Amino acid sequence: MADYAGIPHKRVDAALEEVDLAGRAKDRFGTYSMGMKQRLAVAAALIKDPQLMILDEPTNGLDPQGMADMRGLITALGQGRRTVLISSHLLNEVELMCTRVGVIQRGRMVAEGTIDELRGAAHLSIRAEPADRARALLEAEAGPGNVSVEGDAGFRVKVDVSRAAEINRKLVEAGIAVSELSAGERSLEEVFLELTGTEAGL
């Protein structure tokens, strides 16, 4: 049996089930929360069982729980043969949902790859004093181009993080006081700003 649009009811029911709205199928749209309205829009797109879905700012305007629910839904939708393309300026959300990212500036793709590829290698964040001696030692270990200053007596060192213990030992043996040493990686926002020099967005 089909409705007035020629779409079988079973396909509508399946779409509502996929976005966890089957239990609210007979409720009025006006009673839906913002998150439910977002999921209903996704269900409408799912009715035709597309191989490619394009969603624009799917978590925008949602509360934290709604954002988490939408992320889980999008991740599930992207499994198997279906591809889900997200357009969003919320870079922390993109990091949590996407496997591949494209950075667009003025309508031109300036970078594309997995999140790990765009972030690049991890680095060490080190705070040590005296800063001048610490910097000299770190540059000797990692190369001058791989050491950048961060604040007062702080350094970001592009080096294999497996060398953390070795570098810490050398600093201490040189009489340099290390108050912080941790492995880190660039955020997607840092990558975007580096690539475009503009405000964050994808």
Image (cartoon, helix red, strand yellow):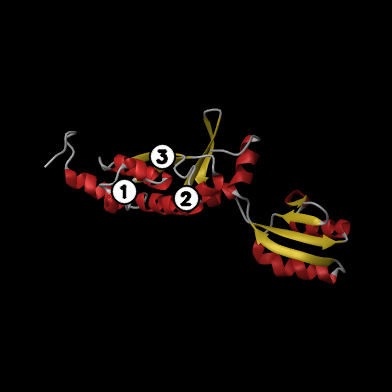
- Which secondary structure lies at badge 1? loop
- 10 Å crowding of disc 1: few (<14), some (14-19), many (20+): few
Vertical placement of residue 156 versus 193, above or below: below
Number of marks in picture:
3
- 10 Å crowding of disc 3: few (<14), some (14-19), many (20+): some
Identify the residue shown where x is 55% and y is 45%: 91
In the rendering, which numbered label is found on residue 55?
A: 3
Sequence-wise, the earlier of marks 1 and 3 is: 3
Residue for badge 2? 67
Q: Relative to residue 110, is residue 138 drawn left or right? A: right
**Camera-side mark, 3 or 2:** 2
Q: From the viewer's side, name the closer residue of 66 and 98.
A: 66
- Which secondary structure lies at badge 2? helix
Residue for badge 1? 81
Vertical placement of residue 103 versus 171, above or below: above
Sequence-wise, the earlier of marks 2 and 1 is: 2
Vertical placement of residue 92 versus 102, above or below: below
Identify the residue shown where x is 73% and y is 64%: 181
